[in-house]
Amino acid sequence: MPKRAGVTALGLGLVAGATLLGTPTASSHGYTDTPISRQKLCANKTVSNCGQIQWEPQSAEGLKGFPAAGPADGRICAAGNAQFAELDDPRGGTWPATRVNSGQSYAFRWQFTANHSTTDFKYYVTRNGWDPTKPLTRAALDPQPFLTVAYNGARPAMTTVHQGAMPSGKTGRHMILAVWTVNDTPMAFYSCSDVQF
């Protein structure tokens, strides 16, 4: 590894370590805006009482390895970060929801402030019968992602669109969890979007 790459990897490791300790970082990194995520709804002031995430919607970063590892149940939308707990608050099921169509093609879009070497992007959806008035848990999600986009270490563009199909057989209110797994750190980014099929 060239010396500069080693320094970059060390720097990313320090940022990851700071995040693990609960210290916010200024160099974090990405969120979904299509369908609009909870953190983007906070940043653009569509939703109020959002706390710190309104100023750094790109910072919902936690350990990777979801669903076997990663943030604890009930803390998934905030990526396990207590300072972003507002993202895990179901607000009685009243988060604004994007209208989508089951089984139809959709352009899932990410916005990045720092684009890292990437393992993949995975998109999960809640099971039929999910209760939107409760915080998100693994048991509330279909066990397999409905869309996986492999990057094999490549860096995504600063605005990245993944074309895929919305999951079939869904009606009513659901949540889509998008997980961006960083390739060269122990971290991933989590983005929750409320949708109405």
Image (tube, rainbow, N blue to C red):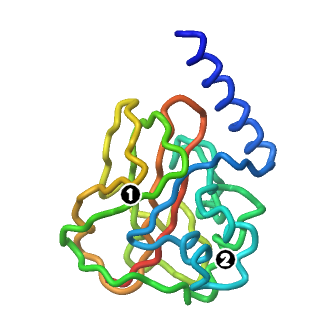
Q: Position of residue 109 (x, y in %)?
A: 37, 61
**Camera-side residue: 168 or 30?**
30
- Corner quadrant of residue 5: top right
**Camera-side residue: 142 or 55?**
55
For image coordinates 66% across by 46% down, the residue present is 27
The secondary structure type at the circle numbered 2 is loop
**Camera-side residue: 8 or 64?**
8
- Corner quadrant of residue 167: bottom left
Q: Residues within 10 Å of mark 1 (few under 14, many from 20)?
A: many
Mark carried by residue 61: none
For image coordinates 50% across by 70% down, the residue present is 37
In the depicted structure, whether residue 72 falls above or below residue 103: above
- Corner quadrant of residue 4: top right
Please, what is the three-letter code of the amino acid marked with disc 2? Asp
Mark carried by residue 123: 1
Mark carried by residue 89: 2
Q: Residues within 10 Å of mark 2 (few under 14, many from 20)?
A: some
Left or right of 83 in this view: 4? left
In the depicted structure, whether residue 108 falls above or below residue 154: below
Q: CA distance from mark 2 to mark 1?
A: 20 Å
Q: Position of residue 8 (x, y in %)?
A: 61, 25
Tag 2–tag 1 contact (CB < 8 Å):
no
Q: Which numbered disc, 2 or 1, marks the residue that appears first in the sequence?
A: 2
Q: Position of residue 134 (x, y in %)?
A: 60, 78
Which residue, as the protein is rendered here, is positioned at the far left? Answer: 104
Left or right of 110 in this view: 95? right
